[in-house]
Amino acid sequence: MTYHYEPSPFMLPTSHYDKAKADRAVTFINNLSHTKGKWAGKKFDLLPWQEQIVRDLFGIVKEDGNRQFLTAYIEIPKKNGKSELAAAIALYLLYADNEASAEVYGAACDRNQASIVFDVAKQMVLMSRPLEKRSKIMGATKRIVNYSNAGFYQVLSAETGTKHGLNVSGLVFDEIHAQPNRHLYDVLTKGSGDAREQPLFFIITTAGTDKNSICYELHTKALDILKGRKKDTSFYPVVYGLSDEDDWNDESNWLKANPSLGHTIGIDRVREAYQQALDNPAEENVFKQLRLNMWTSSSVAWIPEHVYAKGNE
């Protein structure tokens, strides 16, 4: 799928777009294969929103040739191809980022969640003969070794004790909204990549419910940058979702939150989930959070929004 690319508005005047570097990342990812459902075995073919992210992250470089954006915060509803994109970026950082002894970590709240992206990455490697022949996959420890650059991709979670002393070249942090605290995020991002010239911390998540969390802190920072209230030239913000002012009942707003609608997710599935939210008050906030990427005070709303509003009239 092709589209007209325009560099991120957050590209610095002193930075530039290196098309060759961006093309390298896009080509690598598009030569990987999907691993699930009707797309299993088919080449990746980045969707426009995915390609925008990949070109911005790997193609926008500073005067010294290193990446401008070192932290990417991507917030998007479920079923938009989040895990596949995260796995593809993890593999690019391991195999094609020209980083000697690459240390790429996959992080999540627990081992099961952390294994989701790893399992996709593992299957992508097994489905690629050029990658498989220079790799060793250790399923029990959730580790992929790249013999050609002495690098590895390793799964971590909040359950696995101390993570100090790491030399991170790449981090893929999945569903950070579910983190019990900020400890794992701080250990993996504060100083852990200082020995690397251009470490990339790639954080991808759906909205959460805890507004005292590290995820909501990052969410707020991303919105502040997007709206011009804050500036951080190394932080790349992407938030797909509805605001409190948007009508969540309006189907035309659903595409705003779901850039893969009609591709990885069908409109009928969203309509089914919406009807469940109307029929069962307990499903309303679940629909808003997971399908529309709206931050709610709880994942369960026992009193429907329209009933609550009417009672306060």
Image (cartoon, rainbow, N blue to C red):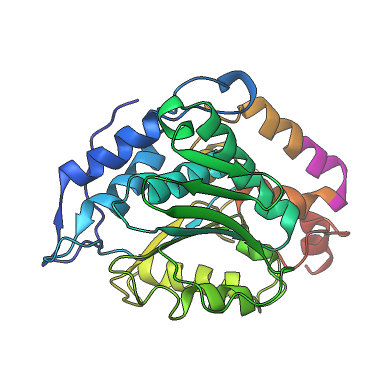
Locate the N terminus by quadrant. Answer: top left
The answer to whether 74 is drawn above or below residue 276 in the figure is below
Residue 83 visible: yes
Residue 295 appears in view: no
Q: Quadrant of residue 47?
A: top left
Vertical side of 38 occupied by 187: above or below: below
What residue range appears in magenta? 275-282
Q: Quadrant of the C terminus?
A: bottom right
On screen, residue 24 versus residue 210, left or right, reads left
Q: Main secondary structure of the magenta part?
A: helix
Q: Position of residue 259 (x, y in %)?
A: 48, 39
141 or 294, which lies in front? 141
Instruction: Identify whether 238 is placed above or below 257.
Output: below
With 11 as the anchor, is 207 left or right in this view?
right
Q: Nearer the viewer, residue 70 or 160?
A: 160
Residue 197's place in the image compared with 34, above or below, is below
Which residue is located at x 33 percent, y 45 percent? 96
- The residue under the point 45% across, 45% down is 91
Rendered residue at 72%/73% (across/down): 180
Magenta span includes 131 = no
202, 245: nearer the viewer: 202
Marks counted in the figure total 0
Instruction: Give the percent coordinates (x, y) of residue 141.
Output: 68, 53
How far from the left and from the top, in percent, is residue 293?
Answer: 60, 53
* Image quadrant where residue 302 sits: bottom right
Image location (x, y in percent) of residue 275:
78, 36
